């Protein structure tokens, strides 16, 4: 009795398989593939490739119905290789777009920067209306030109953006970083006062060198809000000074933003937390700032204040 049951089960399974394969061979993409390779594929090769044809149609239908395929983000494709039928998986347009967006994101490193800076772009920089000013337009043009001309083949100094709160200094740096990312150039944006705090905290774990080196070797470095806090001699000389010295020797583009002009920053850096003054050491730092960047004064209304 068991042999009879096995016989009918085999017959049923064989009938189901024939029906499945009949549907597979009616698939428009399968029909086109077989027609395109009719001179290459023998009947034996087609017979051997039935499982691949079924895999192709099955996975294609899963994706069409919104299910999860064997290779998420990829779509099946029939190929003829080594005299036989095979299935390869190629990335979908959506997957490629997601990869491209992630690559852009990875080219811009930020340390303690405002969230909106990640989305900053030149198109949204406010140049018209009552909040516009010639200096904003000039700074915008300089940074756009840098984003278009810099290719890493030779040294190009960055810019030292100075102006009052809310005139768009930090946003411009973010827009520049994203524009450079579009061209495959990596950059690092650092909120310097917060970075200084992290450096002091890293003393206990003996990781100051690693944290400092991570910043100093960035292909393009942007130090935001420099001068916002009084620096200790150690932070000024062994952190900021070392970073700038390395970048000057390696001729790496460096940008700054500050509420101080370069002249004001010179006086600020000469002061320490104990009320002392070291003008020569401040001048040494500023020599490197001036080598690495060109001062751009940005004036205008505070864009953070809604009227």
Image: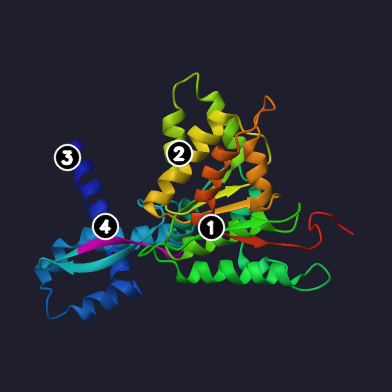
Q: Earlier along the polypeptide chain: callout 2 or callout 1?
A: 2
Question: Which image quadrant is residue 164 in?
Answer: bottom right
Which coloring applies here? rainbow
Residue stretch rendered in magenta on the structure: 86-93
Whether pointer 1 and pointer 3 mark residues with C-beta atoms closer than 8 Å, the reply is no
Please identify, in this view, whether the residue under mark 3 or under mark 2 is nearer the observer: 2
Please identify, in this view, whether the residue under mark 1 or under mark 3 is nearer the observer: 1
Circle 4 sits on which residue?
Answer: 17
Circle 1 sits on which residue?
Answer: 293
Whether pointer 4 and pointer 3 mark residues with C-beta atoms closer than 8 Å, the reply is no
Indicate the position of residue 106 as horizontal and vertical percent values: 46, 51
Question: Which image quadrant is residue 113 in?
Answer: top right
Circle 2 sits on which residue?
Answer: 242
Could you give the CA–CA distance between mark 4 and mark 1, rounded to whole angstroms?
Answer: 72 Å
Q: Earlier along the polypeptide chain: callout 3 or callout 2?
A: 3
Element on which disc 3 rests: helix
Whether pointer 4 and pointer 1 mark residues with C-beta atoms closer than 8 Å, the reply is no
Circle 2 Cα neighbour tier, 10 Å, few/some/many (<14 / 14–19 / ≥20): some
Could you give the CA–CA distance between mark 2 and mark 1, rounded to whole angstroms?
Answer: 16 Å
Circle 4 Cα neighbour tier, 10 Å, few/some/many (<14 / 14–19 / ≥20): few
Q: Which mark is residue 3?
A: 3
Indicate the position of residue 100 as horizontal and vertical percent values: 44, 60
Q: Which mark is residue 147?
A: none
Please identify, in this view, whether the residue under mark 4 or under mark 3 is nearer the observer: 4
Indicate the position of residue 13 as horizontal and vertical percent values: 26, 51
């Amino acid at each position: 009795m068991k042999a009879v049951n096995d016989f009918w089960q085999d017959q049923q399974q064989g009938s189901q398989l024939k029906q499945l394969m009949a549907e597979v061979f009616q698939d428009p993409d399968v029909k086109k593939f077989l027609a395109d390779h009719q001179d290459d594929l023998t009947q034996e090769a087609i017979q051997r490739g039935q499982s691949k044809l079924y895999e192709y149609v099955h996975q294609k239908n899963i994706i069409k119905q919104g299910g999860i395929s064997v290779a998420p983000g990829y779509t099946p494709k029939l190929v003829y290789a080594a005299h036989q039928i095979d299935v390869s998986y190629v990335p979908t347009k959506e997957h490629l777009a997601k990869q491209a967006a992630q690559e852009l994101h990875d080219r811009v490193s930020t340390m303690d920067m405002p969230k909106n800076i990640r989305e900053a772009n030149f198109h949204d920089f406010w140049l018209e209306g009552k909040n516009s000013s010639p200096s904003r337009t000039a700074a915008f043009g300089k940074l756009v030109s840098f984003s278009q001309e810099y290719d890493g083949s030779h040294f190009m100094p960055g810019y030292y953006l100075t102006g009052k709160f809310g005139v768009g200094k930090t946003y411009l740096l973010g827009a520049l970083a994203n524009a450079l990312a579009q061209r495959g150039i990596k950059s690092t944006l650092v909120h310097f006062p917060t970075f200084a705090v992290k450096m002091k905290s890293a003393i206990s774990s003996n990781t100051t060198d690693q944290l400092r080196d991570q910043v100093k070797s960035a292909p393009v470095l942007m130090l935001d809000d420099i001068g916002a806090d009084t620096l200790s001699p150690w932070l000024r000389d062994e952190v900021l000074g070392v970073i700038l010295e390395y970048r000057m020797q390696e001729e790496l583009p460096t940008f700054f933003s500050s509420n101080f002009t370069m002249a004001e920053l010179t006086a600020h850096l000469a002061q320490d937390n104990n009320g002392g003054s070291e003008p020569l050491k401040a001048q040494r730092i500023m020599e490197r700032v001036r080598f690495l960047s060109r001062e751009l004064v940005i004036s205008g209304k505070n864009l953070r204040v809604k009227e």
